[in-house]
Every structure is written in C-alpha cells, then in structure tokens.
Amino acid sequence: MKKVQLITDGACIGNPGPGGWACVIRFGEHSKELWGSEKHTTNNRMELMAAIKGLEMLKEKCEVNVTTDSQYVMKGITEWIHGWKKKGWVTASKAPVVNKDLWLELEFETQRHQTTWSWTKGHASHADNNRCDELATTAARNQTSSE
C-alpha cells in the first residue's frame, strides 16, 4: 500500500465570510498542491474541505497520514464522530452537529484509506502547513481553485 502524506489547512476572511482550503499531497518524490474557495463559508468548513479534497484525489487505497492544524477536524473525525452517530447526530448539549454533511463526506473518504491523524501548530515551523495556509488564504481572497 502506498504511503502518502496529506497536509491541510483552511482559511476564512471573516467567519463567516469568503473562505479557502488547501492541501499538499506527498508521495515519495512527488507532491501536488490543491486549493479551492467558497464565497460565503466558515473556517471550520474550509478545514474540513481541505481534508476531504485531499483524500478524494487518492484513486487507490493508501496509508495516509493527515496533518492538520485544526483540533476541530482531528478530534471530530477520530473521537467525536462516534458519539455523534450514536446520539443521532446531536451534540452532548442536544444541538444538531454543525457541518454534518462534511463530516459524513470526511468519514467516507477516511474509510477508503488507512488513515492516521497528526496535529501541528498553525503558523509555526511546519513548512507544508505554512504553504497550505498561504494557498488557502490566497484562494479565499481571490476566490480561486486548482481544480
């Protein structure tokens, strides 16, 4: 099984506001950058989209290490989602889970692969995360896409 690194980030100008997502996919010597935007969204939706879009690009089952600076995404997909599903997609405070549509997409994509999750501090020393931040912010400002 191929071993792939997926590094992700999302950005929003205002929250909600214009948003962008980006990811870097690394496999051996190869790398690919992807990004996209939405006119009116939230930062959390863009963080989720970055992971979804990166995983969607992988056409065969891979061993994927996803690196994110979003505790929301990492804990949501590795911990919280189990309770949300058990409780009928409501939170501990009985409110509907926000971004359920994207959580379902992310769960589907993670099940296609063998995924592990790593957290990195945003705007710190992780070069690929910093690159994703740059691409996502540019996409949000310019409403652009690599697709």
Image (spheres, rainbow, N blue to C red):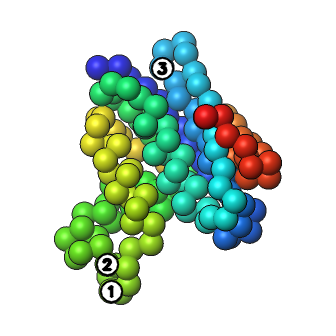
Q: Nearer the viewer, mark 3 or mark 2?
A: 2
Name the spot of residue 86 as percent of width and height, x first.
Answer: 19, 71
Q: Which residue is mark 1?
A: 94
Q: Name the residue at the bottom extreme.
A: 93
Q: Is residue 58 visible?
A: yes
Q: Which residue is mark 2?
A: 90
Three-letter amino acid code of the residue under disc 1: Lys
Q: Which residue is mark 3?
A: 27
Three-letter amino acid code of the residue under disc 3: Phe
SS category of the residue bearing label 1: loop
Q: Name the residue at the right extreme.
A: 142
Q: Is residue 128 visible?
A: no
Mark-to-mark CA distance, 3 and 1: 42 Å
Q: Which badge, 3 or 2, comes first in the chain's sequence?
A: 3
Q: Name the residue at the top extreme.
A: 29
Vertical relation: 71 (above or below) 65 = below
Quarter of image, res 129: top right
Mark-to-mark CA distance, 1 and 2: 5 Å
SS category of the residue bearing label 3: strand
- For the residue carrying disc 2, how many other residues have a C-alpha within 10 Å: few (<14), some (14-19), or many (20+)? some
Q: Are marks 1 and 2 in contact (CB under 8 Å)?
A: yes
Q: Residue at x 31, y 78 (%)?
A: 90
Q: Are marks 3 and 1 in contact (CB under 8 Å)?
A: no
SS category of the residue bearing label 2: loop
- For the residue carrying disc 3, how many other residues have a C-alpha within 10 Å: few (<14), some (14-19), or many (20+)? few
For this rendering, which residue is in front, 71 or 23? 23
Mark-to-mark CA distance, 3 and 2: 37 Å
Name the spot of residue 87 as percent of width and height, x first.
Answer: 22, 76
